[in-house]
Image (cartoon, helix red, strand yellow):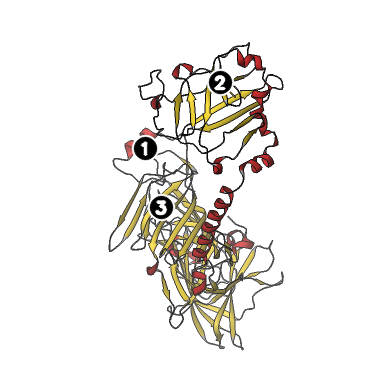
Amino acid sequence: MRLPRLAVLAIASLVSADVNTTHESRDILPSTFKPAQHFRNVNLVRNINLEKSYARETINVVVENVDAQPQSEYFLPFEQRSLGRIGGLEVKDKKDPEKAGFLVDVVEVDPYGSTQYYKITFPSALPSKEQLTLSITYYTLSALSPLPAQIAQTDKQYVLHAFSAYAPSAYTTSKQKTKLKLPGVDVPDATTLPAELNADGKEDPQKQGTTYTYGPYNELPAGAVQDVSVRYEFTKPLLHATLLERDIEVSHWGSNIALEERHWFHNRAATLKTHFSRVTYQQSAYYNPPTPALKEMRFPLTIGSMDPYFVDEIGNVSTSRFRSNIREANLELKPRYPMFGGWNYSFKVGWNNDLKGFVRRAKGASDQYVLKVPFFEGPKQAEGVEYERVVTRVILPEGAMNIHFETTVPLVSNATGLHPTFMDTIGRTTLTLTAINMVDEFRDRDLIVTYEYPFAARFRKPLVFFAGLLAVFVVSWVVGNLDAYALRGLLAPNSNLMYNIGAAAIPQAISKVPTQSVKMVNVPKTRRTYCKGKECKKHTNHKVTQYKAGKVRNTGGEAQRVTTLIRSPGFPIRSGKRRYDRKQSGYGGQTKPVFHKKAKTTKKVVLRLECTQCKTKAQLALKRCKHFELGGDKKTKGAALVF
């Protein structure tokens, strides 16, 4: 859990912000602060719902102004140890719940004190002797503790919830009672209170089905506490998400909105006494008994959702089912393994929607748009899901400006920035919203974002894409017209060495062996890109597509020659093998010469040479060409060709 100092920021019931701003709700008061007794709680009813893996508390209280002056600030106390687990606090007028909620802030008094306060500000000051009925709702995360902490794989799970029979209050309370709603009737332990404390003289708690009632109690002073606890059967997962990251990417060009959620789950249920048994798990699957392990998750999506995916750290998870029709769209997921108590599982899930179902053009403004999406979605489980931290990021098109948003989700902070993506110039405008201590009951809350998207900004990416392609073609054309000889001289000054190896060899060694000729005929001037030097008048580096065989004959003079040297330690010049392609012979791989057969592929003739004096190795690659006449046949396959 986050520190209380951070948790107390999630209070605002209605948030509206502009671009490049960050909002934090905070009010700092001196450490000696004590709420003035301007109010009195005439009647207070507190309801604690324990049907899910978290506690939801609703306090309906009639507040009376006992001061002579109108008052507008009401303080609600919490213990320091539980403040960091309080989330989703909202205050409304009980008699008019349709109105917007009251402004709620946290007051920071003494970070090491035992009590902290929330400040509730009324829309208008309450006159003296007047009354106001408040409906205060909040959630307490990690409120249930497994007891015992370890169980067998098929055992029932019991959880313990500790609380105060008296509702937290900074003012005197004339009359109050607390009701608990449990998920079942299997309640082995519940703290009992003597009848003397009860206003009706009854022993607490009073049981009626799955409802347990403490009270009513007569007048109690401010800050009164009566610790009690209840232990009941809850054989369900205690699903706790340490982090939920949600991305909402808007694309006007693609008329699409892409949504992705990344979850990090932890099951707070009782851990296993022994190792997990797959056999026992498979046997129990036939009659499907209650279990604290998480087996599957259900994501109710917006109608029209498509292209869902389910991926974890290993890769794609195929145990998913997607059903979509004109009435609903449901995504059912099964984790790669059942999540028992103490186990973790992280994954991401995403889907697409048509943009027209979420974005509309604002009336009277051609460049202004309104986006309406759920703040977060996540799985909808019967046992409930609690979220320690939720980060929602809205990625708008590049060039969007004047961002405004509105939501009823209590936020910690909001900020805007840039998110660079493919072919962007400066990046897309991004709105990041952060909330803490959330529960799945907030999954239906909407986030409304208004932004301006100018007409000129819509063509920024196509123009950048076109300019990029044009630059690639221009660079390719320039590189293709460079002088290869000059380029090689700059990049590899010693590259001429590969052509001078033959001149450095012993002439007598060449004259004593039979030779084969390589004759270059009709080479266009545009393809003469490199010359071997004074020793050779022919050009050998050119674009080639075909070669033909010639006759074996001894040549001399200025004719370019290829000497066939059988690999032997006695010869000063050695190289790799001159490889033939059997398919090009036309004789099924037999050792027959190739006569005017056009190559099906652009195979290269690779010459690898090594100098016996300096041990310099060089390689020359020549493609087949109609200007390249090679004497010899397949029998010289193992020979080395040397210029």
Which label number is shown at residue 555?
A: 2
Q: Tag count in the figure? A: 3
Front-most of 456 and 167?
456
Q: Residue 419 at what x, y percent from top left? A: 56, 61
Image quarter where the N terminus lies is bottom right
Tell me the residue that label 1 is attached to: 281
* Residue found at x 59% / y 87%: 70
Q: Residues within 10 Å of mark 3 (few under 14, many from 20)?
A: some
Can you give x and y, in whole percent of width and height, for residue 444 in the image?
A: 42, 66
Circle 1 Cα neighbour tier, 10 Å, few/some/many (<14 / 14–19 / ≥20): some
Vertically, is 132 above or below 60?
below
What kind of element bears circle 2?
A: loop
Amino acid carrying mark 3 in the image? Val
Mark 1 or 2: in front is 2
Position of residue 627 relative to residue 448, above or below, is: above
Label 3 residue SS: loop
Q: Is residue 193 visible?
A: no
Kindly give the residue lying farthest to the left in the view shown.
326
Q: Nearer the viewer, mark 1 or mark 3?
A: 1
The part of the image, by quadrant, that contains residue 72 is bottom right
- Pick whichever, 630 or 468, lies toward us: 630
Does 412 appear above or below 617? below
Question: Looking at the image, is mark 1 or mark 2 earlier in the sequence?
Answer: 1
Of the residues under marks 2 and 3, which one precedes in the sequence?
Answer: 3
Residue designated by label 3? 187
Amino acid type, mark 1: Tyr
Residue 499: image location, x then y, percent: 64, 29
Q: Position of residue 393 (x, y in %)?
A: 52, 62
**Vertical placement of 541 versus 225: above or below?**
above
- Residue 514 visible in the displayed image: yes
Q: Quadrant of residue 226?
A: bottom right
Q: Residue at (67%, 73%) from the top-left corner?
A: 34
